[in-house]
Image: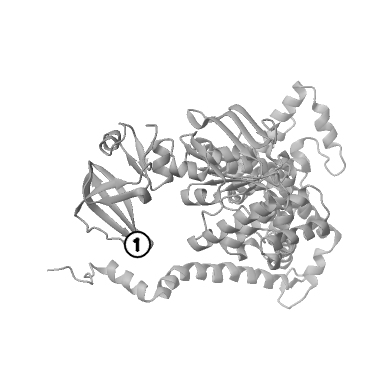
Amino acid sequence: MSAPAILPARGFADRMTATFWRHPRVLLAILLTPPLLWLGVVYLGSLVALLWQSFYSIDEFSGVVKQEFTLKTYAELLRPSNFDILVRTVIMAAVVTLACAALAFPIAYYAARYAKGHWKAAFYLGVMLPLWSSYLVKVYAWKLILAKEGIIGWAAERTHSSWIIDGLLSIPGLEGSSLSTSPLGTFAVFVYIWLPYMILPMQAALERVPNSMLEASADLGATRGQTFRTVILPLALPGVIAGSIFTFSLTLGDYIIPQIIGNSANFIGMAVYQLQGTAGNIPLAAAFAVVPIAVMLVYLAIARRMGAFDAL
Amino acid sequence: MTAAVEFSNVSRHFGNVKAVDGVDLTIAEGSFFAMLGPSGSGKTTCLRLISGFEKPTGGAIRIFGEDVSNTPPHLRNVNTVFQDYALFPHMNVRDNVAYGLMVKGMGRSQRRAKADEMLALVKLGAYGDRKPAQLSGGQRQRVALARALVNEPRVLLLDEPLGALDLKLREAMQDELKALQKRLGLTFVFVTHDQHEALSMADSLAVFNEGRIAQIGSPQDIYDRPATRFVADFVGSSNVLPPDLTRALGGPAEWASLRPEATRLAASGPVSGRVTALRYLGSGTRVVIEAQGTEIAALVPAGQPVPAEGTTTAIAFDQGALHLMGAA
């Protein structure tokens, strides 16, 4: 007696697996329907609603939203007081992104190229640990660190280097009574908070650059600097861009850090928060919210044109 | 004539692991030198010591008489064809080949012309604008070769360059590499674990075992007169005879090797055994006989009678074919 060529189905799971084998698309449909519903209806739907709102305007006397299509709200964005907010936010996001990239690269490079075993675990823990604690607690902790009586001020006083901080705080545009009330403080906290989002994609990208590629570059006569510019950077660029999308867009949208740290100058996020809340100007809030989306689209288009995704 | 590469008592230890241990080696200028050995035998580490990706923990390495112990890879006038080719995926084929010239500061039009020239030499003249990902394995291998040769190195290092190719392509590339080496008159140092490749391509070769050189010599030397059991085992399909069997066959009580081509089947003789396996090779049949617990292979040329499996036959051999060797 030999075994049958076709084994009997043992139950429901066997029959389901057989069904999926005969109709591969069924499984795909089951898997994709919930996320597509979420993405399509809740996510994209609210985005479209937002866009829609931004083309309405508010009646300046009654404060009622006029449901007519107009570009008047967008024109309002160009008013000096509003335009300042846009410029300030975009500059801050750009500077924060550059600083994050500069700080993240050595860490990511070390983790991707040298860290093994326990050191790799220590790296992941070190990078992720700050993400486990509350964002608000961290920001308030930084307020204390950066305050005049904080540890930085104390250390500067003890080492007679307070003049460095005073000097920085007297630079036009960065003025403040202490680091925690200066745009420098806002910048420092942004960099601290978003740094992990730059390190992780960068490390993933650098890990995909095989060692033999770096050796080949040296073998062909390239210095470390040439290898960095012509091999490492182009190959890691998709990771850098991915990281910069996080740091750039998170800074563009944040409204808590500039509220707690810095000189209370308005940022896009804060403007949106105030406009939709106390002011009740939903159309202008929506128009403000469209700006980061537009900026990111322009940024990605430039990155693409520069060949950032060629190595993907 | 100065040696192209010279190792004097070179070691490379990684902690307790002696990857390369006290190697002395001289590679003549213009020769095709193969480093043969199983994985972990130290052959690749030796290659990396020449290119500079490993630093010796002892001894001295000279390239054309110059001590390179303190010279980083980018200042050594040697180039490598990497095992995985290591082509830059974000550059097209022409820019890959021109890379070495670019980092040395050669102008764009000049280096592109040189790269195209070199691509033509490896028969890829029309592929300059493609990306490496659009090429086949054999084509990528040629690009890697062109990229190394365009720098006019004094020594070309090849790290298992044919390992990833299929058999037919590999044989074609072997002939081509050999021809290229002859034409350029360049010193090629070639790492491989494939004994046929090493024997058929090299002018001389070193057989590595556990970080040391087991034997160094011409392919004929190595194949006909293996110095140790390891070499006989690894290099050839040679039969390795223990001392008892050597004596039974009429030699002294020492380890010996006997090539299958020189092994004959006879009706009667001092040593006989049972035929355990037959393999038809076209040009003949390989017959394996088990005698006194040792398997002995004999090559029966086509046209001669082949014994059936399970039958008993005696073993004979050509005069002088028995080669005595050390036990190591």
Classify mark 1: residues with Cα within 10 Å, few (<14), some (14-19) or many (20+).
few
Q: Position of residue A32 (x, y in %)?
A: 47, 69
Q: Quadrant of residue B133?
A: bottom right
Q: Position of residue B99 (x, y in %)?
A: 73, 53
Q: Position of residue A96 (x, y in %)?
A: 73, 47
Q: Nearer the viewer, residue B241 or A248?
A: B241
Q: Nearer the viewer, residue A287 or B67?
A: B67
Identify the residue at the far front of this view: B319
Q: Which residue occupies 40% across, 38% down? A: B230
Q: Which residue occupies 55% across, 71% down? A: A40
The chain letter under disc 1 is B
Q: Nearer the viewer, residue A29 or A118?
A: A118
Quadrant (top left/top right/bottom left/bottom right) for the C terminus of chain B: top left
Horizontal side, residue B309 vs residue A231: left or right:
left
- Rendered position, A80 above or below A283: above
Identify the residue at the far left of this view: A1
Q: Which residue occupies 26% across, 49% down? A: B289
- Rendered position, A18 above or below A185: below
Kind of residue at badge 1: Ala
Q: Position of residue B180 (x, y in %)?
A: 65, 55
Q: Nearer the viewer, residue A266 or B133?
A: B133
Residue under numbered circle 1? B302
Answer yes or no: is residue A255 visible.
no
Answer yes or no: is residue A142 visible.
yes
Horizontal side, residue A193 vs residue B318: left or right:
right
- Rendered position, A48 above or below A156: below
Horizontal side, residue A114 vs residue A9: left or right:
right
